Image (cartoon, rainbow, N blue to C red):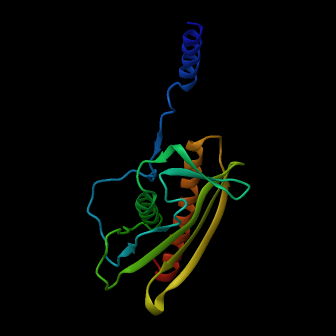
Amino acid sequence: MRNILLTLVLAGALSGCAGQPPSAHYYLLRPDAPIETRQLDFEGGIYLQEIKVASYIDQPGLVLYQDDGKVHEARYHLWAEPLHLSLRQFLAAEIASQLGRDVSVEKLPEEGTEPVAIRIDQLHGSENGEVVLVAYWQVGSGERLTSYQFASRTAQTRDGYGALVEAEKSLLVQLSRAIADTLKEQHAL
């Protein structure tokens, strides 16, 4: 009897410790500017190719880089859709906003098209609240191909994964501005 009572007490204590698992939080990467209903104009088109993303950040969970060189992927703070897809839509919208003209994510006819290829090598937070973005992009093709790099850091404005996403968005807007500036310089847009 004593063993049964002890077993029941231990089982009750363990079940109380187990509790409910934490719920997942999902984050969407979307531009802040409102989208309006209108016909898109891709004349003299700019085509944003598929974005290449380092595999360690192209994961469902948000990523933190730790001081000892380890990478931590959050289990309960997740991107709502694959990062390489949302990055492409986000950057296309932000570049278009900076240029004042539409940017296609669908392949356009080759004639007069300006392809833009982007590779994201780093996009993560750190234990000390710093967020980093390192990216490379190429504009054009063949003999007209030019390459660029972007590296920037910013501090989170507060603790938490929501603040991490806000800081990452801020850095991605800076990247979009840099890409738009190179397109303006090359083509007097």
- Judge whether 111 appears above or below 105 on screen: below
Q: Is residue 80 left or right of residue 132?
A: left
- Judge whether 117 appears above or below 1 on screen: below
User: What residue is shown at x 73% (from left), y 56% (from top)?
Assistant: 68
12, 63: nearer the viewer: 12
Give percent across and percent down for residue 79: 46, 49
Q: Of all residues shown, which one is farthest toward the top?
A: 1
Q: Of all residues shown, which one is farthest toward the bottom?
A: 143
Q: Is residue 99 left or right of residue 150?
A: left
- Judge whether 184 appears above or below 9 on screen: below
On the rendered image, what quadrant is the N terminus found in?
top right
User: What residue is shown at x 52% (from left), y 75% (from top)?
Assistant: 137
109, 33: nearer the viewer: 109
On the rendered image, what quadrant is the C terminus found in?
bottom left
179, 131: nearer the viewer: 131
Give percent across and percent down for residue 92: 42, 64
Quadrant for residue 110, please give it: bottom left
Give percent across and percent down for residue 50: 41, 70
Quadrant for residue 100, please give it: bottom left
Give percent across and percent down for residue 147: 55, 81
180, 49: nearer the viewer: 49
- Judge whether 180 appears above or below 36 on screen: below
